[in-house]
Each structure stands twice: as C-alpha cells, then as structure tokens.
Amino acid sequence: MKKEDYIKWDEYFMGIALLSTHRSKDPSTSVGACIVSEDNKILSVGYNGMPTGCSDDDYPWKREGSNLETKYYYVCHAELNAILNYTGGHMKGAKIYTTLFPCNECTKAIIQKGIAEVIYMSDKYSETDSVKAAKKMLDSAKVNFRQYNFIGKDLVISL
C-alpha cells in the first residue's frame, strides 16, 4: 500500500520557493520563486538579490532614502532571477510559484516568457500601483493567478 500523506505538487513547488528565500541577503524582504513546466518538472529557481558580479557588500539594502541609497535600483527580484537563470528552451505553459505577488516589471517578463499561471503566497502589496498594474496585465494576457492554499501542516527540513 502506498504512503497517503505525501505532499501535493503545489506544496512541493511552493516549498522550493520558500527554501529559495533563505538564499536572499535582503534584511527586510526575502522572496523566492520556482518555475515549473506543464508536466511538473522544475525549470528554474530564483531569489531576490544583487545581479551577478555586483557584490552584496557594495550596494545598499536600505528601504528608505534617496533612490541611489536604497536597494530598489539594484536588486533583481526572485521572479526575474528565475527567468534569467533558465538555460533551457521555452517556458510556454509553465507555472511560477512565488512567495510574494510579482511586481509590474516581473509580470512583464512572466507574460513575455509565456508563463501561464502565477501561484503566490503573499499579496501584502496588493494596494500598490505596481501590483494593481501587474494584475491588470495578467488579466489582459489571460495569465491565471491564484493564491497558494496552505495544507494546514508544517513541513520541516532538517539540515
């Protein structure tokens, strides 16, 4: 008889996105993303951080201050990192699991790559213009998006 308490695909892939958040060095918001093919194969993962070749020690991580003194002009978001990290063929029909609803800039890349569904954990910036624009674009492009449904149990990974 097979095991009955195995995790479903959503839990598995969101778990990988959550694990990816632990690679981020952002002290205030760590985000992870996992892109999955139509047949549930992992295509790529990403987390928010500085672009390759830009030292995490040489750029600001602050949220407040002038534009050049904060992280916002420098950090590459998890969703975009996952897209850029992919070295395979197309992403048409794929799903992206992300721990935070994507901003408008990441949404443009998601749409352009042909990703068909966004599964997100948190929508804490839902009232911002960036997320409102992202949702409008996803609707226009007929890209499905839905909030992840928690399974109601903790999964513990021991390292």
Image (cartoon, helix red, strand yellow):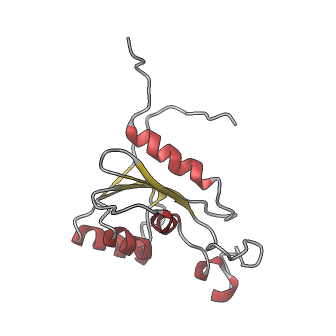
Residue drawn at the location 62% of the way across and 68% of the way down: 49
Which sits in the foreground, 28 or 116? Answer: 116
Image check: 6 left or right of 62?
Answer: left
**x, y (%) of residue 35?**
42, 55
**x, y (%) of residue 111?**
32, 70
Residue 57 visible (yes or no):
yes
Image check: 5 left or right of 19?
Answer: left
**x, y (%) of residue 17?**
51, 51
**x, y (%) of residue 135?**
32, 69
Residue 128 visible (yes or no):
no
Q: Quadrant of residue 128?
A: bottom left
Q: Quadrant of residue 94?
A: bottom left
Which sits in the foreground, 46 or 149? Answer: 46
155, above or below 112, in the image:
above
- Image quadrant in which the C terminus is located: top right
Image check: 30 left or right of 27?
Answer: left
26, above or below 153, in the image:
below
- Image quadrant in which the N terminus is located: top left
Furthest-front residue in view?
88
64, above or below 87, in the image:
below
Furthest-right residue in view?
57
Residue drawn at the location 34% of the way across and 68% of the way down: 113
Residue drawn at the location 44% of the way across and 23% of the way down: 5
